[in-house]
Image (cartoon, rainbow, N blue to C red):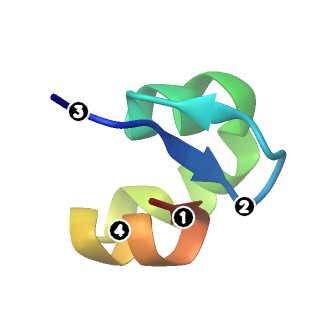
Amino acid sequence: MFGKAKCKLCGDSVRLALKHLRDKHPDVYESQVRKMKMPDIMDKFFTV
């Protein structure tokens, strides 16, 4: 099954990376994430 990723910004364990960034870190989501592709988002903001 799917594992959880750990957010590098706050340390939370999350399953839905984009939803977490949108809800918990809206400033980062608006400024950076919307322009990035998913593999780049996972490398920059999450550890698997």
Position of 13 relative to 27 (above/below) = above
Q: Tell me residue 32's x, y (percent).
A: 54, 67
Query: Which residue is located at x 53 percent, y 30 percent?
Result: 14
Decide if residue 29 is on the left or right side of residue 25. left
Q: Nearer the viewer, residue 17 or 2?
A: 2
Q: In which quarter of the image is the N terminus?
A: top left
- Residue that numbered label 4 is attached to: 35
* Labels 3 and 2 touching (C-beta < 8 A): no
Q: Nearer the viewer, residue 17 or 29?
A: 17
- Spatial distance from mark 1 to mark 4, Cα to Cα? 20 Å
In the drawing, what numbered circle is on residue 47?
Answer: 1
- Spatial distance from mark 3 to mark 2, Cα to Cα? 19 Å
- Residue that numbered label 2 is attached to: 8
Q: Which of marks 3 and 1 is nearer the N terminus?
A: 3
Secondary-structure class at tag 1: strand
* Labels 1 and 2 touching (C-beta < 8 A): yes
- Spatial distance from mark 1 to mark 2, Cα to Cα? 7 Å
Counting labels gives: 4
Decide if residue 15 is on the left or right side of residue 29. left
**In the image, what residue type sits under mark 1?**
Thr
- Residue that numbered label 3 is attached to: 2
**In the image, what residue type sits under mark 4?**
Lys
Q: Tell me residue 28's x, y (percent).
A: 68, 55
Q: Which of marks 1 and 2 is nearer the N terminus?
A: 2
Secondary-structure class at tag 4: helix
